[in-house]
Amino acid sequence: MAVCQGNRNPFLAELVPMAISNDLILHAMLALSGVHQADLAGLPVDQLTWVHYGQAIQGQKYGLTLMAQGDKEPLVPLLVTAIILCAIETFRLNAGAQALSHLKAVRVLLHEASSLSNSQLGPDTRAFLRERYAYIMTLAHISMGQESDLWVQEDIAQLFATSKAEPESHFKSGCVHELFGLVPMVSVVARRTRDELRRGTGLVEATIECWRLRSIISSWQPRSDDEVYRLCGLLYQQTLLVYLESALESEPGGLSTHGSGLGLTERTLEGFVRFLETVPVDSPISTSMCWPLAIFGSCARSVGHQNAISSRLEELSLTYATQSVRDTRRLLEMIWESKNPDMASPLCFADFMKKEGKTVLFF
């Protein structure tokens, strides 16, 4: 769940000390640990874990009731617990909708917590909670559809704006801030570009903006010597490029192959598969690889590319025992089996999920 390992893992460094002094956070942490450990061992979740989970849910409801009555004291434990509950749901089958519900609660609670002093919420813990929310909301945006565009863009622009001076600071979840801050905009511009090209209106506003964004992302260079930071940046740089390129290819012949015989999407996919071959499955950046694999998988039309992406998702699910990774793999297989060219785009995820009655989150 975080690229920082050992003592630098924020779930250990920030949340465990809080759990020791707060029963609500402790129940949530024990539930998270129990659900994950059972999945890693291939065993059913034990009864005690479900007791902790039930206590966390019950305590969350009670705390929210107190807040509705004007009591702000439970705010920080409620915020932390909501983030942990969101993580728990990623290890449970068919729990994407519940995870989104917890995530929306995090949004409200984080806004309330923004006015707390450093003595009430320490700067390191505050930075971790802000980044964690921004990370998971950025990745969840594609699953929520365009009705969430406006407020997600506003949240992400605000939360990542303070990180530009020191891009590697508070780099915990695996998001290179200057690239992650572009993800919601890429989704919106890609959708508008696709719609413009399908209408046959030529190169107008959204399409020009799409090329401009592609140029900005292509020119990104890591501003840190940290190898994990560099690899995360390269991973998301390639993913954002293929996202935009898939929109530019919405109209047959709409994107020049520049004489290579391959469209830009296909060439970026080739580069991504080569990149995967250089990254071991237990690399720290693998904890943030599900969303890129989903985006590339939705664009993959050749069996070779589909197999490479499916294999990496299977390896990740075995290594990290994350149900959301298994759900991602199955969702992509359903899209590939449909052989519908209109589905060969990350822009189709939300509609496809709605049609199938599923909510899959790519983290």
Image (tube, rainbow, N blue to C red):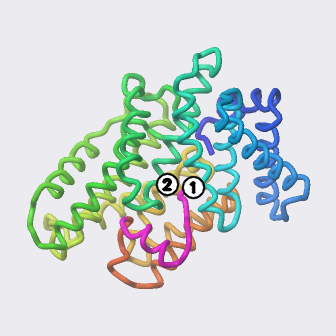
For badge 1, the amino acid type reads Leu
For badge 2, the amino acid type reads Ala
Q: Which of marks 1 and 2 is in front?
A: 1
- Label 2 sits on residue: 140
Kind of element beneath mark 1: helix
Left or right of residue 148: residue 105: right
Residue drawn at x 29%, y 63% as measured from the top left? 267
Res. 303 in view? yes
Q: Badge 1 local density, few (<14 within 10 Å), some, or many (20+)?
A: many
Residue drawn at x 63%, y 22% as measured from the top left? 121
Look at the image and say whether residue 270 sits in the magenta stretch: no
Q: Look at the image and give the residue range highlighted in magenta.
A: 347-363
Left or right of residue 2: residue 350: left
Give residue 47's position: percent from left, percent from top: 90, 58
Whether pointer 1 and pointer 2 mark residues with C-beta atoms closer than 8 Å, the reply is: yes
Kind of element beneath mark 2: helix
Identify whether 248 is placed above or below 283.
below
Give residue 30's position: percent from left, percent from top: 82, 44
